[in-house]
Image: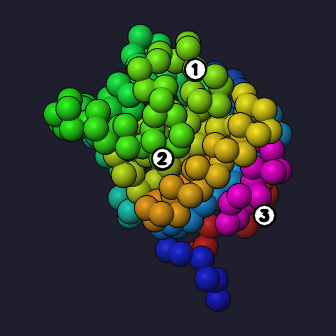
Amino acid sequence: MSNRPAPLVAARDLVKSYGRTPALRGACLEVGEGEIVAVTGASGSGKSTLLHCLAGIVRPDGGTVTYDGKRVDLLPEDRLSELRRTDFGVMFQFGQLIPELTAVDNVALPLMLAGTARGAAQERAEEWLERFGVREQKDLCPGELSGGQEQRVALARALVTGPRVVFADEPTGALDSLAGEQVMTALVGAARASGAAVLLITHDAKVAAYADREVRLRDGAVVGAEVSA
């Protein structure tokens, strides 16, 4: 019997194409509560598309996506946006911070969009910036931050709402080895402390080693059996 936790997020038989180019061909994946799963594979294997489907950013052409037993792929856009403000935290390869906002305002933004007053949101944002060692940079805009600082601010933004699932797409892809190690240590530490599940997309074996489990994707499908009956 498997000791794997019950699925919190699951993809079954996902199919997705962009024009005539298939990205996913029947991909299946499960991520349990509190589990850190790394998805690896060659460039073009469908890793980012799989994450985007699971996070409700992209709708699959076929198959199902579930979160906490409910279908994500059938939800309207407003409900998907709400999920990404509350239950899902998303961290992209290049941070994708809003360039006109300071670090503290970037982190506070998801809280304010969810209805938290500005002062309280900024206070909580500063706590997360402190946790990741970038509080001194709170009044700087993204263009004034180093790559490692920017990714740590993006990580704080992904975690500030207390999500149940963190989706991290190549979070160290643009960083040197030291900065990448700092970001991964911060991500795993925060996830363990809060009990959040993490779906991590990476091409780096050193980054994948931080996960509880590694899943390989090839030509849009998971290599080997992944989803239980």
Can you tell which of label 1 and label 3 is closer to the viewer?
1
Which residue in the structure is indicated by mark 1?
145
Label 3 environment density (alpha carbons within 10 Å; few <14, some 14–19, many ≥20):
few
Residue 116 lies left or right of residue 218; in this view the side is: left
Residue occupying the far bottom of the picture? 1
Query: Of marks 2 and 3, which one's residue comes earlier in the chain?
Result: 2
Q: Nearer the viewer, residue 78 or 185?
A: 185
Q: Which mark is residue 43?
A: none
Residue visible at 35% across and 37% down in the picture? 125
Kind of residue at disc 3 = Gly
User: What residue is rendered at 47% in x and 63% in y?
Assistant: 193
Above or below, 146 relative to 162:
above
The residue indicated by pointer 2 is 131
Q: Position of residue 224 (x, y in %)?
A: 78, 63
Q: Quadrant of the C terminus?
A: bottom right
Q: In percent of the image, x 65 and y 25: which residue is there? A: 147
Residue 83 versus residue 131: which sits nearer the camera?
131
C-beta proximity under 8 Å, tags 2 and 1: no
The amino acid type of the residue labelled 1 equals Leu
Q: Badge 3 is on which residue?
A: 224
Q: Between marks 1 and 3, how big is the CA–CA gap? A: 41 Å
Q: Earlier in the sequence, mark 2 or mark 1?
A: 2
Q: Is residue 150 visible?
A: yes
The answer for how far apart the CA atoms under marks 2 and 3 are is 38 Å
